[in-house]
Amino acid sequence: MTNTQIKLAKRPVGLPDADTFTIEKNPVPTPGEGEVLLKTKYISLDPAMRGWMNASRSYIAPVEIGAVMRAGTVSEVVESKHPKYAVGDILVGNAGVQEYIATDAKGYHSVDANLAPLPVFLGTLGMPGFTAYFGLLRIGEPKAGETVLVSGAAGAVGSVVGQIAKIKGCRVVGIAGGEKKCKYIVEELGFDAAIDYKKGTLKADMKRTCPDGIDVYFDNVGGEILNTALTRLNMHARIVICGAISQYNNTEEVKGPSNYLSLLVSRARMQGMVVFDYAKDYGIAAQEMGGWIQQGKLKTREDVYEGIENFHETFLRLFNGEKMGKLVLKV
């Protein structure tokens, strides 16, 4: 029995190529006292992983060259020397892109596999869902009747942001790439309107779909879309900076917002958010969102691909638009 591991071989410039990672087969580790042996069932693929490959200063230490690629996971306990966990328990944590790990399980939490399909615990009831929940509710502070604009609206975070905003009584406009995604967020998720940024008429479409301006902008993409949204802000608008996927693979300098003086004119607030800051309240988010799922108010969608050896090509789907909802790799 071997442990297939995907390790970071080099720091990529631009979009990671196949040589960015190596595939290794090593012996399955043996758990020590106070540890469990976990077998990975599903791996979460997230845009943030691209940032973790860089050596630059960030909110979390970079993945070291030669180390297993960092990733969120859902795993099953297959051997236990831990007082808290038994064989068969399902744990969510950061086991990385590998089949097995021996760990003391600090930073992991158990979930009930009967509550939802396991990939949901990496999406709506996992980090992306918590990011949407806390970013929108704690920083965006939406009020009923306000206009909420969301970029990356068909993705794991954006799709949940829009649905929560609707639950809170807001008018919701989503920005997505392509007719299929725009149709999905309006017809299936209940957004009020969609903007297809690929049409090249972003400014006119934003004016048309947000005629009364923007009260909350939840930004997952940065670049031109953020810059354009700044021109449509209402008084005391709130901008949540969650990510900047349009900039992650830049080989030049990151393009910042030149329209930032709109913040001054509108007395608006732009604030960054990292989900780890809300870790103590994850249970609150899981309970409330779990209730919304059961009531049919919150829909989940997971885009699942299979095979750890297909990690690189599946990871690239984050950046080429070839996915809907939460991207997950089944091991």
Image (cartoon, grey):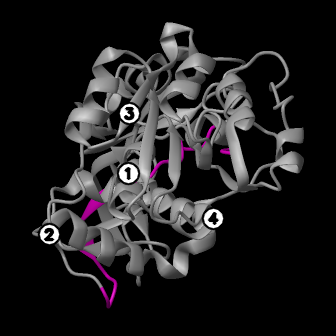
Q: Quadrant of residue 3?
A: top left
Seen from this angle, which residue lies furthest top?
A: 200
Q: Is residue 70 magenta?
A: yes
Q: Earlier in the sequence, mark 3 or mark 2?
A: 2
Dot 1 amino acid type: Val
Q: Which mark is residue 115?
A: 2
Q: Main secondary structure of the magenta part?
A: loop
Report the front residue among 138 and 321.
138
Q: Which residue is mark 4?
A: 139
Badge 1 crowding class, 10 Å Cα cut-off, few under 14, some 14 to 19, many 20 or more, is: many
Q: Are marks 3 and 1 in contact (CB under 8 Å)?
A: no
> Could you tell me residue 207's position as x and y percent?
58, 27
Mark 2 or mark 4: whose residue is earlier in sequence: 2
Q: Position of residue 118 (x, y in %)?
A: 20, 56
**Picture quarter with the C terminus:** top left
Residue type for callout 4: Ile
Find residue 298 and report its image quarter. bottom left
Q: Earlier in the sequence, mark 1 or mark 4?
A: 4
* Vertical side of 228 occupied by 7: above or below: below
At label 2, the amino acid type is: Leu
Segment colored magenta: 61-84
In this rendering, position of residue 306 left or right of residue 312: left
Distance from the alpha carbon under mark 3 to that under mark 1: 15 Å
Foreground: disc 2 or disc 4: 4
* Residue at the extreme front of the image, as rendered: 212
- Tag 2 secondary structure: loop
